Amino acid sequence: MSQPLTLAPMLRKLELWTALNTADQAAVLPLPHIIRRVRAHEFIVREDDRPRHSCLLLSGFAFRHKIAGNGGRQIFSIHMRGDIVDLHNSMLRRADHNVQALTDVEAAFIPVAAIDDLVVSHPAVAKAMWYDTLVDAAIFREWTLNVGRRDARTRMAHMLCEFALRLHVAGLGERMNYTLPMTQEQLGDALALTTVHVNRMLRSLEKDGFIERTQRSVRIVDFQLLSRIGDFDARYLHLEQAERDETTIGTGS
Amino acid sequence: MSQPLTLAPMLRKLELWTALNTADQAAVLPLPHIIRRVRAHEFIVREDDRPRHSCLLLSGFAFRHKIAGNGGRQIFSIHMRGDIVDLHNSMLRRADHNVQALTDVEAAFIPVAAIDDLVVSHPAVAKAMWYDTLVDAAIFREWTLNVGRRDARTRMAHMLCEFALRLHVAGLGERMNYTLPMTQEQLGDALALTTVHVNRMLRSLEKDGFIERTQRSVRIVDFQLLSRIGDFDARYLHLEQAERDETTIGTGS
DNA sequence: CGACGATTTGAAATCAGTCAAGAGCAGTGG
DNA sequence: CCACTGCTCTTGACTGATTTCAAATCGTCG
């Protein structure tokens, strides 16, 4: 059961969305949970499971995806520290997609029943979690737009911008300079492109001076510029509150 | 403020997801609201608005969409009677996408503040609404998969299956025989295809005997078969409860 | 009847996919 | 310490599904 502050990243995430009073905070932190390490590539939830736990990421990266009948894989989202990664599946009772570890992961598994009780007794927490779901949904919409209506290069640039911002907000990644937690194949499955084409688009962005790269590490030369190239407008991430007390990420200074 | 049963379709929808006791029902029905007619093509919410009402569809169809920088439009979902069509935008406080009437629409506009109060005083209702958001998100994921990983014909067939089922559940559409509320251009924006290609795919499905069509009306010859063609598996709609007491829709009898 | 939007069809162009192969890099074991 | 293995990244040539462009037909409504 470990120290009482293990679930602090969850509180941090929820408070991005709504202010929580002391009583609410005091209800979240002592939620029962089990810490477990999950190896890269292991499944956290499988489609059709009936999950009995919700999973809070403490370190590492995970992703949601689904396999089409023709074998194609579509990745829906990438998750990082503080994300409650299968609130969707566990609240719906029956998983409609897979959640898999991208890297080695440390996670807190919270019994669904405990969350069920919590949301009844603490409406403000329920609202924060609901809000979290709403933001997830907003990101899904943006990804649909990305895949459906943007060309390959724009899509790629858009993804790089989203990563930069989300890593920054999660307190990972050093501003405009971060390491992608995924291979080009996985990037392809998120963008609905082939590995080959992902590679070409990355090189194209590099050649044109929008980014610098070595292996997985990416340096965004000018965030504003890449945003324009990637048709990226951060509003869909609903981070207004989070950004209030941050220096603007776009200035690069 | 009209009769006390105007909001019954909302109750019906929420009870697809969770049982509500008499007190909860009695809290939903008298929510303050204004009935308004909205003409086809009119906007219900615009990106960047700060909506002060949530909108329950009583009749007609509406859709959510967003315009990319290159002018392309991506439709995220189609809504029908009983759908609470901008819970997303109104709860997030700042709209990140547009909601527009597809046909002439009759809708009940409920003040956001009233819903805010309701979810604090009635946790079961809050949970049902949250669940509704979760199902919306599940549908967004499936659409991303559709657009990202299925070819044009499969995508088209998938959409026709989803419509059949959802119209049926909403108590509209006559089983395997319904009228599409949208033009081929709008279908294209939902499937991320051009009008021309939508037309070709429809004709192809028709030629091969999977559907019959006249104008907007569609008859699905064999639902099981079209499901196979469209890689359609209804589980993402999370209708288990709803289907429990329905005769199987697939048998066509 | 005329007009306008929606549907249909054909031909040409293109973006991204497929196929194939080589290069780089990390970990393993001899 | 180096060869071997396996994965990821990179590149080129070719293919093909879908788009683009253009024009004809259909339907509905004033």
Image (cartoon, coloured by chain):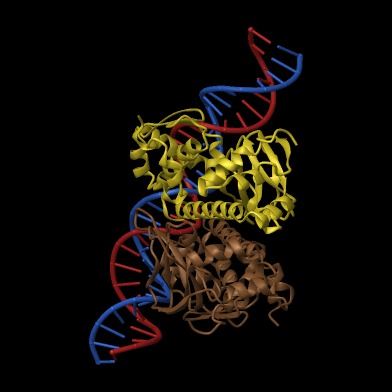
Chain colours: A yellow, B brown, C blue, D red
Task: Give the total of numbered labels.
Answer: 0
Residue B8: give x, y in percent of width and height.
59, 79
The image quadrant of residue B5 is bottom right
Q: Residue at x 51, y 67 (%)?
A: B114
Residue A64 or B211: which is nearer the viewer? A64
Residue at horizontal 53 percent and vertical 69 percent from the top: B84
- Vertically, is B183 above or below B64? below
- Look at the image and tell me in which quarter the C terminus of chain B lies: bottom right
**Along the line of sight, the residue nearer the viewer: A169 or B115:** B115
**For residue B220, above or below residue C19:** below
Task: Estimate the x, y position of residue A198 in percent, counting from the top left.
Answer: 48, 40
Q: Left or right: B184 with respect to A137?
A: left
Residue at left offset 71%, top offset 67%? B240
Answer whether residue A96 is visible to the viewer in this image.
no
Foreground of the two, A188 or A110 = A110
- Is residue B123 among the parts visible in the rendering? yes
Q: Give residue A156's quadrant in the image.
A: top left
Task: Kindly give the residue lying farthest to the front in the view shown.
Answer: A22
Identified at 65% across, 42% down, the residue is A56
Q: Position of residue B243 (x, y in %)?
A: 70, 73
- Residue C18 x/y as whole percent: 55, 47
